[in-house]
Each structure stands twice: as structure tokens, then as C-alpha cells.
Image: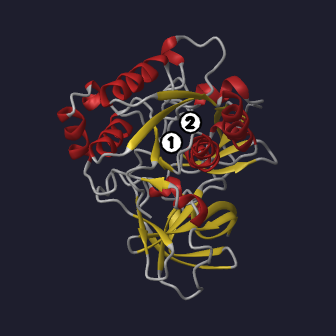
Amino acid sequence: MKPKKSEKICIAMSGGVDSSAAAALLVKQGYNCIGIFMKLWSEPNSSACQENKCCSADAFADARKVAHQLGFPIYTLNLSHEFKKIIVDDFLKQYQNGKTPNPCIRCNKFIKFDLLLKKAKGLGCNYLATGHYAKITNNKNHKLELQLPKDKHKDQTYFLYNLNQRNLKHLIFPLSNLEKTQTRRIAQDQGLAVYQKPESQEICFVPEKSHYSFLKKYLKLTPGKIVDEKGKVLGQHEGLALYTLGQRKGIKVGGIGPYYVIRLDRKRNNLVVSNQKNSQEIKTKIFKLANTNWISSQAPLANQKIKVKIRYQAAPVSAKIKNNLVTLAKAQRAVMPGQSAVFYQGQRVLGGGIINKIIK
């Protein structure tokens, strides 16, 4: 449903080019806008360069400047406590339990499109706009659909599979029909200094580029042996929670290699590796899902032709699903419990769930 020009729209402002351009488009279209900047959790006593990348002091300064330039008020919403409990603590818990979580998916579900949306409604806004690259459409059955955006390279629908009919009707994605180059041009034409601001693709609450240092700081790790498929000891690992299937980087076995993680032997606390990058041991064809969400509220039929992505950057592969058991047309490398599997049919996002169990 398209908002009326008299209705207020809340814009999630991060100080980046995408949310700024989204705001500029809505203002240009004549909507009455207000902005919200979310203050999320950062490590205690962190320096300016270690702040949460999504809500640093510099990010807020950029967001406030954009809002003032475009002529609408901006408010700060402090969700530090909720973010720490719901996102950061869960991230650490999942790694401790040998799973590979995706905090961005969880943040969209619980923070942006739950807590933030509720706050927007509390401010008298019936709609929340964000800078996501995704599209919302109505189908012939009068249900809302989440679809791929025009810019397939920036497609963020993988992170949004938990949306449903209740919150979709309150969301606006102004960038759905734009390429990223067009987004930057809109910001530049509006005189917004953020038009050339670089993107941050790391985990927002992790100060370093790699999350391993962060995990080492907060997890209880037990060092153990690195062994090959035959049990030969090759070196020492720092704790199984720091490794994932198919991983190459960070395996300390001296000058030999390269080696790839093929198994996490928790019973013996051994990290099992192979010099075969595509070892059959790390390929998966069948897995079980938990915490599924279907955007139309109906799961795909068992014979329905669909595709699934098991990671954000992974290519979609044909699959079938029945009773949350997923069978891939072709076995995929390094499928890990904790990852999200997201299902597509053509341009439409059907929904998805968290990979809970690998079936060998």
C-alpha cells in the first residue's frame, strides 16, 4: 500500500549513502519525514575507531547533517542494551556451540523491523523506510511479496527473509528500482557529502576486520590438536569455536599446506583438516531447518521448483523442501549449522530458516 502524502514516514538513518539517498527521494516526492538514528552496542571503553560501525559518533554526525539539509527532524533511539542481549550475546553463544550465526539477519528481524518499527509507530508514523536494496509488491491474491531489487549485485533480500505480512505493509524500500551508481548520484545531486562514503561490509559491532580477535576475547576456548584425515598431528588449534568448515585462513600447520577444515571433532577436541579443497567430507546435500518463516505464511509445496541460498554470497541452487527437510539438487560445500537458508522462486523471496542439522 502506497502511503498518502499527508502521512508521516520514519526513515532509518545510518549516516551512509543508501539511507541518505532513500531519505532524499522521499522528501523530493513530498512526504512528511522524520529520521531515527539507532544507537547500538559497542565494546565498553572502546576508542572512537572501535565504535560500532553502524552508530559511531561520526555516523550520527553524518546522519544529522543529512536530515538538516533535507529539512526534517532526526531522533536518536538507544537500543544498546537490547542489541547486546539479542544480537551480540546470541552471536557469541552460537559460536561457542559450534554454529555459524548471521547477526545481520537477526538484527533485521528483532531490531530494525520489530523494535525500530514499533518506535516509528509511537512517533505517529505508519511507515518505516530504510536503505535496503529489496522490493515489496502486491500479488494477484492481494498478498505482499518480497522480491529482488533492480541492482542484483546489491540485493539484500537474503537478510530479510524473516519479514511477514504484518510488517511488510508498514515498510518502504525507496532504492528498490535503483542501481548503486544511481543512488550515489542522487545523494551527490542533493549536495549530500556522504555520496562518496565507502561501504562497511564487516560485522558492525566487531572493531577488527576479522571477528576472530573478538571471539578470542569473549569465548571460553580450549586449545587442541590439528590432525589430518588419518589422525596425523600437524599442529595446534586455538579452540574449535574459531573455525568453520572449508576454512583455510588461520590454520597454523607451519610451512606445509594449504589445508582446509573438513571436520570439527568435538569429542576429541581435534580440528580435522585436508589438503583437498573440495573434499567430499565437507559437501552437503540434505539438511534440516529450524525457525522457518514463510513470507506468504505458507511453506513451499514439496514439488515446487525453487532455489536456495545457503550464504549471502552463495549462488542459488535448485532444491526441494518437505517438512523442513531440504534436499539440494547438487551438494554444496561447507554448509554449517547456524547459517540461514533462504528460498527463492524467480524474483520472489519465499522465506527461509536456520540450518539446524546436517544429514549425511
In the image shown, does 201 or 169 lie closer to the viewer?
169
Q: Amino acid at mark 1?
A: Arg
Residue 90 visible within the image: yes
Q: Amino acid at mark 2?
A: Ile
Q: How is the image coloured?
A: secondary structure
Which residue is situated farthest in the right direction here? Answer: 267
x and y, in percent, of residue 184 in the image: 24, 38
> At numbered mark 1, what does the secondary structure look like: helix, strand or loop?
loop
**Left or right side of 191 for 276:** right
Task: Check the image and report above or below for 43 versus 188.
Answer: above
Task: Check the image and report above or below for 139 versus 120.
Answer: below
x and y, in percent, of residue 74 in the image: 47, 28
Rendered residue at 82%/48% (across/down): 267
Residue 277 visible within the image: no
Q: Which mark is residue 251?
A: 2
**Left or right side of 250 for 223:** right
Report which residue position mark 1 lands on. 248
- Mark 1 and mark 2 in contact? Answer it, CB < 8 Å: yes
Rendered residue at 64%/11% (across/down): 45
- Which of the 4 quarters of the picture holds residue 353? bottom right
Q: Label 1 crowding class (10 Å Cα cut-off): few <14, some 14-19, many 20+?
A: some
x and y, in percent, of residue 241 in the image: 69, 39
Which residue is situated farthest in the front direction here? Answer: 6
In the image shown, does 250 or 135 lie closer to the viewer?
135
Quarter occupied by the C terminus: bottom right
Rendered residue at 57%/31% (across/down): 211
> At numbered mark 2, what does the secondary structure look like: helix, strand or loop?
loop
x and y, in percent, of residue 359 in the image: 69, 69
Task: Check the image and report above or below for 103 versus 313.
Answer: above
How far is disc 1 from disc 2 in space, using C-alphas? 6 Å
Quarter occupied by the N terminus: bottom left
- Which of the 4 quarters of the picture holds residue 223? top right
